[in-house]
Image: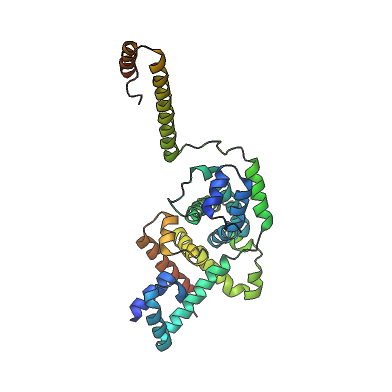
């Protein structure tokens, strides 16, 4: 039996043009990337668009990635965080100039969890998520949905560990206030 | 562990003790067993973390993965060759190695076919004629 190919192995092969290796990388990481993007944007269609952009960037830049500099997942989550925040800025501008209703962000996906858990409490919680400042939301999503350590979040967001800890403390306190009672 | 420390760790690592620093877990479990106020705080944090997980939940999408790979295979923007600092250094080292090998081979051949004095003159010319080549 051959050992399982690591992310580094696959990325090296993808950099040489192997679509098979790239496909394995996508299959291995796409759901986590979509999950982070969905947690940040609150919208499944946006999350899927972001995932496409993220992996296309991986494909295009695979040859410039140097093993050992950072873990592959840290690199992918960094791309994901940047795409999410860029997209959100564009959306906010569109809302500001009246092209998109604020409500559409929360109302546009048909997550079955909403039906199961009941719309009321969940929507309050989702709204609390949506109301978090971008960097707080990204930090808490990377921590909880991405299961990243605080040091890994710091690397993905290009911040110090101390700065990430401040974001997490504020985000958790804000969400706790909304979910209390 | 006092309440302040417990709350700080809760805010930093969330309501999953498995993600707390190993050294703090036993003390945290004791606080949780003994302090109803901290139990309540822990439970509220657990609900908040669950909110994030629910908000982040996605249905599996194999079709999207296949679509991404298909898009990549049609992608015309991918550079054929990317120059990185490591590759540049390796390429330069390779060039120097090849040039050096060529010089050595030429010198060996010349030693067979050119008289000694002419070879000395040629070496001087080469040293002056290609400054920094090696």
- Nearer to me, B54 or B109: B109
Name the residue at 42% across, 56% down.
A155
- Nearer to me, B28 or A87: B28
Q: Is residue A153 above or below residue B12?
A: above
Tell me: B69 left or right of B35. Answer: right
Can you give x and y, in whole percent of width and height, for residue A45 in the image? 63, 56
The outermost residue toward the right is B63
Can you give x and y, in whole percent of width and height, for residue A145 in the image? 53, 65
Tell me: B84 left or right of A102. Answer: left
Name the residue at 36% across, 58% down.
A160
Can you give x and y, in whole percent of width and height, for residue B114 in the image? 38, 12
- Nearer to me, A179 or B100: B100
Screen quadrant of the N terminus of chain A: bottom right
Q: Is residue B95 visible?
A: yes
Q: Is residue A101 visible?
A: no
Q: Quadrant of residue B108?
A: top left
Can you give x and y, in whole percent of width and height, for residue A87 in the image? 53, 51
Name the residue at 51% across, 76% down.
B47
Name the residue at 40% across, 88% down.
B34
Q: Is residue B47 above or below residue B112?
A: below
Q: Is residue A131 above or below residue A50?
A: below
Q: Quadrant of residue B40?
A: bottom left
Q: How many marks?
A: 0
Tell me: B19 left or right of A117. Answer: left
| Picture colour scheme | rainbow
Q: Is residue A141 above or below residue A86?
A: below
- Nearer to me, B109 or B13: B109
């Amino acid at each position: 039996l051959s050992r399982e190919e690591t992310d580094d192995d696959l990325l090296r092969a993808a950099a040489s043009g192997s679509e098979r290796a790239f496909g394995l990388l996508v299959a291995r990481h796409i759901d986590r990337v979509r999950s982070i993007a969905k947690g940040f944007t609150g919208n499944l269609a946006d999350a899927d668009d972001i995932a496409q952009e993220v992996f296309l960037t991986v494909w295009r830049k695979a040859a410039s990635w140097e093993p050992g500099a950072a873990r592959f997942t840290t690199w992918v989550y960094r791309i994901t965080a940047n795409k999410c925040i860029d997209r959100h800025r564009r959306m906010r501008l569109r809302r500001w100039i009246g092209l998109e209703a604020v409500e559409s962000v929360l109302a546009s996906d048909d997550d079955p969890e909403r039906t199961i858990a009941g719309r009321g409490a969940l929507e309050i919680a989702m709204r609390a998520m949506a109301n978090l400042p971008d960097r707080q939301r990204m930090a808490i999503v990377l921590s909880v949905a991405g299961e990243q350590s605080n040091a890994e979040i710091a690397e993905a967001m290009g911040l110090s560990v101390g700065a990430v800890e401040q974001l997490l403390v504020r985000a958790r306190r804000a969400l706790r206030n909304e979910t209390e009672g | 562990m006092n309440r302040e420390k417990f709350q700080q760790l809760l805010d930093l690592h969330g309501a999953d003790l498995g993600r707390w620093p190993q050294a703090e877990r036993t003390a945290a479990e004791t606080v949780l067993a003994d302090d109803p106020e901290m139990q309540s705080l822990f439970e509220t944090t657990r609900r908040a973390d669950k909110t994030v997980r629910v908000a982040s939940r996605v249905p599996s999408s194999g079709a999207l993965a296949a679509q991404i790979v298909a898009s990549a295979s049609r992608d015309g923007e991918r550079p054929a060759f990317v120059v990185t600092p490591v590759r540049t250094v390796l390429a330069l080292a390779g060039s120097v190695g090849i040039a050096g090998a060529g010089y050595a081979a030429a010198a060996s051949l010349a030693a067979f076919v050119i008289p000694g004095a002419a070879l000395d003159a040629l070496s001087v010319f080469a040293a002056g004629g290609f400054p920094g080549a090696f």
